[in-house]
Image: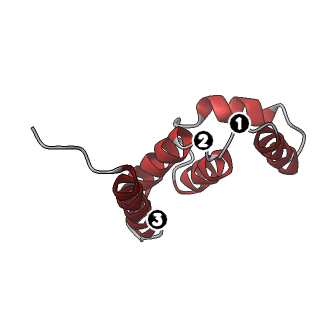
């Protein structure tokens, strides 16, 4: 088989991938944009970039209100009185060292 790429090289390709997905997510084709945002959400979750993951979900809900990708996050967010409270939760996670 083929040898794996070195970590810096993998990271560079991951960043390029996320940049391309961001471009697609801003496009006029809502179906493609939704797919791109779902991929970005998964990437950001995996990288523990929770604020970016939540933002991807928010954008996804704007273009597809019936999407269920972030259902669990949405249920938690509904228990918070204001959207700024969700930002406080994200900040708390960052302060605890639970996010990159």
Q: Real-space Cα distance between discs 3 and 1?
A: 25 Å
**Image spot of residue 24 (x, y percent):** 39, 66
**Which numbered disc flags the more N-terminal residue, 2 or 1?**
2
Between residues 100 and 51, which one lies in front from this camera angle?
Answer: 100
Could you tell whether 38 is left or right of 52 in the image? left
Q: Real-space Cα distance between discs 3 and 2?
A: 18 Å
Residue 73 in sight in this render: yes
Q: Secondary structure at mark 3?
A: helix
Which residue is painted at 75% across and 39% down in the image?
97
Q: Is residue 78 above or below residue 52?
A: above
**Image spot of residue 82 (x, y percent):** 88, 46
Rendering quarter of residue 3: top left
Q: Residue furthest right?
A: 81
Residue designated by label 3: 22
Pointers 2 and 1 in contact (C-beta within 8 Å): yes
Pointers 3 and 2 in contact (C-beta within 8 Å): no
Q: Quadrant of the N terminus?
A: top left
Q: Secondary structure at mark 1?
A: loop
Mark 2 crowd level (few <14, some 14–19, many ≥20, 10 Å Cα):
some
Residue designated by label 2: 48
**Residue 79 numbered mark, or none:** none
Residue designated by label 1: 98
């Amino acid at each position: 088989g083929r040898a794996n790429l070195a970590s810096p090289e993998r990271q560079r390709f991951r960043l390029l991938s996320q940049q391309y997905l961001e471009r697609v997510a801003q496009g006029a084709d809502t179906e493609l944009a939704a797919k791109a945002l779902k991929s970005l959400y998964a990437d950001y979750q995996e990288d523990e970039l929770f604020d970016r993951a939540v933002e991807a979900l928010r954008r996804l809900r704007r273009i597809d209100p019936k999407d269920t990708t972030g259902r669990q996050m949405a249920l938690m967010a509904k228990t918070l009185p204001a959207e700024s409270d969700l930002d406080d939760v994200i900040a708390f996670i960052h302060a605890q060292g639970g996010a990159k």
